[in-house]
Image: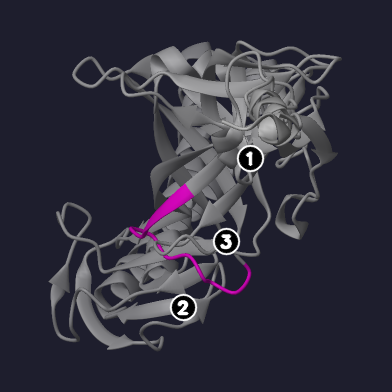
């Protein structure tokens, strides 16, 4: 090799040595962006939707107080009737005859009493003059008193017959809606009949009887505040009725077979929307802590073992995963039982980009309009 080529060779070797030297460090990966919220306690009221059945506020079976033949019906079936309104007319002729007989018996008793009284008055001066014996006078006084008693008895009998004659017109005992007639015209009815003549139901207000496990009664506001707690009545498809409802009481008797107790709710029913026998649902408030924590549902993940977990950030933005226990869902939010505390920074979206110990860039989570009320069912 010629000496004159040495400079070129040395330059090439120096260039190759430089190309094998240490490479510049790559730029650090930026932290992933996640949306977060700061947890704050909020008062909530949990609700239980319990199945129930509607019962009439008052029920009256129309029965005759005297026996007789039904001459005619005096009402329209399925209409509203008022207390005291005539419903059926029984044949009054036999009762009128008994009334007349009682009236005649009263007249006879009164005449006998007048005669006995006069006899006793005539004998009084004679006993003072020793013209008659004391025995004769005492007998006359006894006859007078017995006649007076007979008059009183005859008056009572006449009054009873007067009532029986009035009872020939069968009247409504309560106001409400009357159903179909259960006896026809021409039928013979009596006080001992097993079946009523008709039935009246008062349904301008109704009862709704729901059943709740006895072990859950203590958690209901209604049990702790009887007569003050409101309720909401729902139809079979879950739509609420616009009716005023108030919890009256919880029954003291527990069904030995099911372990349930009955809760009675009074519902104002002016439009007769609820009818006796209907199945409905009643929404009752259940006690809950005043400092409950609610977290969006999308913030909670499930591990393969079914355990719920969430991601949180500390003050430096470092991510960590926590196991939590969640309960009821309120307005698309979980009620947290354990695992989180007020003030924790919770990751709502972007968890898939996190790893344990990785730093993240927190961004405020924008609450959807449907969750604008953080407490969901806020305590009233």
Q: Nearer the viewer, residue 238 or 95?
A: 238
Give the camera-side residue of 133 and 287: 287
- The x, y position of residue 129, in whole percent, is 68, 18
Label 1, on which residue? 350
The answer to whether residue 97 is magenta is: no
Crowding near the residue tagged with mark 2, few <14, some 14–19, many ≥20 C-alpha atoms within 10 Å: some
Residue drawn at (41%, 18%), measured in percent from left and top?
Answer: 307
Whether residue 163 can be seen here: yes
Determine the secondary structure under disc 3. Answer: loop
Number of other residues with Cα within 10 Å of mark 1, as a class: few under 14, some 14 to 19, many 20 or more: some
What secondary structure is the magenta-colored segment mainly? loop
Q: Give whichever of discs 2 and 1 has the lower sequence position.
A: 2
Estimate the x, y position of residue 330 in percent, counting from the top left. 61, 39
Q: Is there any visible trace of residue 105 in the rendered image? A: no
Residue shown at 57% from the left, 41% from the top? 298
Q: Which residue is mark 3?
A: 240
Label 3, label 2: how far apart the Cα atoms are = 38 Å
Kindly identify which numbered label has been placed on residue 86. 2
Which segment did they paint magenta?
A: 270-281
Regarding mark 2 in the picture, which secondary structure is present there?
strand
The label nearer to you, 2 versus 1, is 1
Q: Are the residues flagged by discs 1 and 3 in contact, CB closer than 8 Å?
A: no
Quarter location, residue 285: top right
Give the quarter of the figure containing the C terminus.
Answer: top right
In the rendered image, the vertical position of residue 153 relative to residue 213, given as above or below: below
For disc 3, the neighbor class at 10 Å (few under 14, some 14 to 19, many from 20) is some
């Amino acid at each position: 090799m010629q000496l004159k080529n040495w400079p070129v060779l040395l330059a090439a070797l120096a260039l190759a040595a430089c190309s094998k030297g240490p490479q510049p460090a790559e730029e650090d990966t930026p932290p992933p962006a996640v949306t977060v919220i700061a947890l704050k306690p909020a008062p909530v009221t949990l609700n239980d939707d319990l199945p129930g059945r509607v019962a009439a506020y008052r029920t009256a079976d129309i029965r005759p107080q005297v026996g007789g033949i039904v001459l005619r019906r005096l009402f329209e079936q399925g209409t509203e009737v008022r207390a005291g309104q005539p419903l059926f007319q029984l044949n009054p002729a036999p009762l009128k005859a008994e009334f007349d007989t009682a009236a005649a018996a009263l007249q006879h008793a009164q005449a006998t009493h007048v005669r006995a009284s006069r006899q006793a008055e005539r004998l009084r001066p004679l006993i003072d003059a020793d013209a008659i014996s004391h025995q004769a006078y005492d007998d006359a006084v006894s006859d007078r008193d017995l006649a007076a008693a007979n008059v009183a008895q005859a008056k009572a009998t006449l009054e009873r017959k007067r009532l029986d004659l009035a009872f020939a017109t069968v009247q409504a005992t309560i106001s409400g809606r009357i159903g179909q007639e259960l006896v026809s015209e021409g039928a013979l009815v009596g006080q001992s009949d097993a079946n009523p003549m008709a039935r009246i139901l008062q349904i301008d207000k109704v009862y709704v009887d729901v059943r709740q496990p006895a072990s859950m009664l203590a958690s209901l506001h209604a049990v702790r505040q009887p007569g003050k707690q409101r309720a909401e009545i729902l139809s079979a498809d879950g739509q609420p009725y616009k009716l005023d409802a108030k919890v009256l009481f919880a029954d003291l008797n527990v069904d030995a077979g099911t372990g349930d107790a009955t809760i009675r709710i009074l519902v104002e029913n002016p439009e007769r929307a609820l009818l006796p026998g209907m199945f409905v649902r009643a929404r009752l408030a259940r006690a809950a802590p005043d400092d409950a924590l609610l977290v969006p549902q999308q913030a909670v993940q499930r591990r393969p073992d079914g355990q719920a977990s969430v991601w949180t950030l500390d003050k430096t933005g470092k991510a960590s995963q926590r196991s939590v226990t969640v309960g009821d869902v309120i307005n698309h939010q979980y009620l947290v039982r354990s695992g989180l505390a007020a003030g924790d920074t919770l990751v709502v979206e972007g968890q898939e980009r996190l790893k344990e110990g990785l730093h993240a860039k927190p961004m405020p989570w924008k609450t959807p309009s449907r969750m604008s009320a953080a407490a969901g069912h806020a305590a009233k």
